[in-house]
Image (cartoon, rainbow, N blue to C red):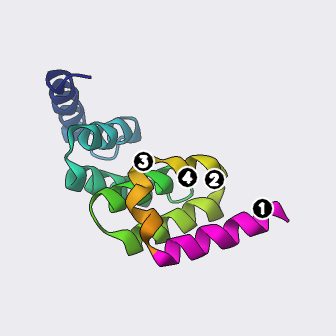
Amino acid sequence: MKSNDLDFEISFLEGVLKHRPNYIDALAPLAEAYTRRGFFKKGLEIDKRLAFLCKEDPVVHYNLACSFVLSGITSKALTALKRAVRLGFTDLEHLQRDLDLKPLRDYPPFRKWISSLSAKISS
């Protein structure tokens, strides 16, 4: 998507949220649009709001983890990933190849956790 299209999408969704600040169907695509545009901190703020509003949604917590990584906050990213898995996120293959999570793969606590998680699933 071109940056002009993303800018339009962001502007539109921000306008919707002025009238309905907790409208999940606008928050989720806005977080994604911010991230695609490279506005990682803004995406993180929206993902935090979504995690507060959707406490039991594993995909929301997975996306929050991605936003933490993209913002350079690895310890909180791992916490969010663990929560996503506890809530039912099961696509570990995707988790291990997701480019957003690439910086996390060098984080020793992540490697230890993913190794133990893979061992649990294999048994």
Q: Which residue is mark 4?
A: 95
Q: Dot 1, crowdedness within 10 Å: few (<14), some or many (≥20)? A: few
- CB-based contact (under 8 Å), mark 3 and mark 4: no
Q: Nearer the viewer, residue 90 or 109?
A: 109
The overriding secondary structure of the stretch rendered in magenta is helix
Q: Which mark is residue 61?
A: none
The three-letter code of the residue at mark 4 reads: Leu
Q: Which residue is mark 2?
A: 92
Q: Give the CA distance from mark 1 to mark 4.
A: 14 Å
Label 3 vs label 1, nearer the camera = 3
Q: Which residue is mark 3?
A: 99
- CB-based contact (under 8 Å), mark 2 and mark 4: yes
Residue 82 shown left or right of residue 10 in the figure: right
Q: State whether residue 94 is above or below residue 49.
A: above
Q: Which residue is mark 1?
A: 121
Which residue: 35% across, 40% down?
23
**Residue 112 colored in magenta in the image:** yes
> Whole-percent x and y of residue 87?
63, 60
Residue 102 shown left or right of residue 4 in the figure: right
- CB-based contact (under 8 Å), mark 1 and mark 4: no
- The residues colored magenta run 108-123
Q: Dot 3, crowdedness within 10 Å: few (<14), some or many (≥20)? A: few
> Whole-percent x and y of residue 49?
34, 56
The three-letter code of the residue at mark 3 reads: Leu
Q: Dot 4, crowdedness within 10 Å: few (<14), some or many (≥20)? A: some
Which residue: 33% across, 47% down?
22
Q: Nearer the viewer, residue 20 or 35?
A: 35
Q: Give the CA distance from mark 3 to mark 1.
A: 23 Å
Q: Give the CA distance from mark 2 to mark 3.
A: 13 Å
